[in-house]
């Protein structure tokens, strides 16, 4: 199985909230794991609300050191993200994240009910807090 990690899943990990162990297991597992550039961007503006800038940069480096591959934008992904966004119900960042899971035929690990509306998206939703 291949995974794409949403920001919400990583927040559970770094805030040690319910589901953190599941996210950790995916990051340490043998399956392919992708981190969309949008996930890292969101972490860079959400985490400073909870942690110092130094700790945020340390977290980003920890993620980059895992076996997860950071995926930067490309034109095909952008087209798919626009199609997902056109359907409505998702933020721009979430449209990019869902689109990566769709084009990579991956399972999205997340906590957001908004992803439930994306046709064809394989997802594992972490338990509510």
Image (spheres, rainbow, N blue to C red):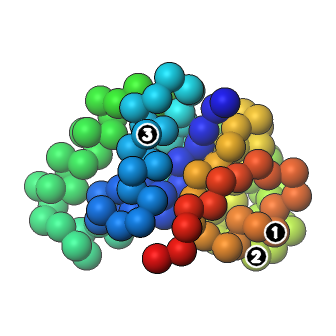
Q: Nearer the viewer, residue 97 or 14?
A: 14
Q: Residue at x 56, y 26 (%)?
A: 31
Q: What whole-number distance in Å separates the C-alpha atoms at marks 2 and 3?
A: 29 Å
Mark 1: few, some, or many residues within 10 Å (few <14, many ≥20)? Answer: few
Upstream in sequence: badge 2 or badge 3: 3
Residue marked by disc 3: 25
Q: Nearer the viewer, residue 76 or 34?
A: 34
Mark 2: few, some, or many residues within 10 Å (few <14, many ≥20)? Answer: some
Q: x, y (%) of residue 81?
A: 74, 53
Q: Tell whether 23 sits left or right of 93.
A: left
Q: Residue at x 46, y 49 (%)?
A: 22
Residue marked by disc 2: 89
Against 124, residue 46 (above or below) is: below
Determine which of the numbered discs, if any, sits on residue 117 in the image: 1
Q: x, y (%) of residue 116?
A: 76, 67
Disc 1, SS: helix
Residue 16 lies in what quarter of the image? bottom left
- Discs 1, 2 touching: Cβ within 8 Å: yes
**Quadrant, the N terminus:** top right
Disc 2, SS: loop
Residue 45 lies in what quarter of the image? bottom left
Against 117, residue 14 (above or below) is: above
Mark 3: few, some, or many residues within 10 Å (few <14, many ≥20)? Answer: few
Q: Nearer the viewer, residue 107 or 56?
A: 107
Q: Nearer the viewer, residue 2 or 50?
A: 2
């Amino acid at each position: 199985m291949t995974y794409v990690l949403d920001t919400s899943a990583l927040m559970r990990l770094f805030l040690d909230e319910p589901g953190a162990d599941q996210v950790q297991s995916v990051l340490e597992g043998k399956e392919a794991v992708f981190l969309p550039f949008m996930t890292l961007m969101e972490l860079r503006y959400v985490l400073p609300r909870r942690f110092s800038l130094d700790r945020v940069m340390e977290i980003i480096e920890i993620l980059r050191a895992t076996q997860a591959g950071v995926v930067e934008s490309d034109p095909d992904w952008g087209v798919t993200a626009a199609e997902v966004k056109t359907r409505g119900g998702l933020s721009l960042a979430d449209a990019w994240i869902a689109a990566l899971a769709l084009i990579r035929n991956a399972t999205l690990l997340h906590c957001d009910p908004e992803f439930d509306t994306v046709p064809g998206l394989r997802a594992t939703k972490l338990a509510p807090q």
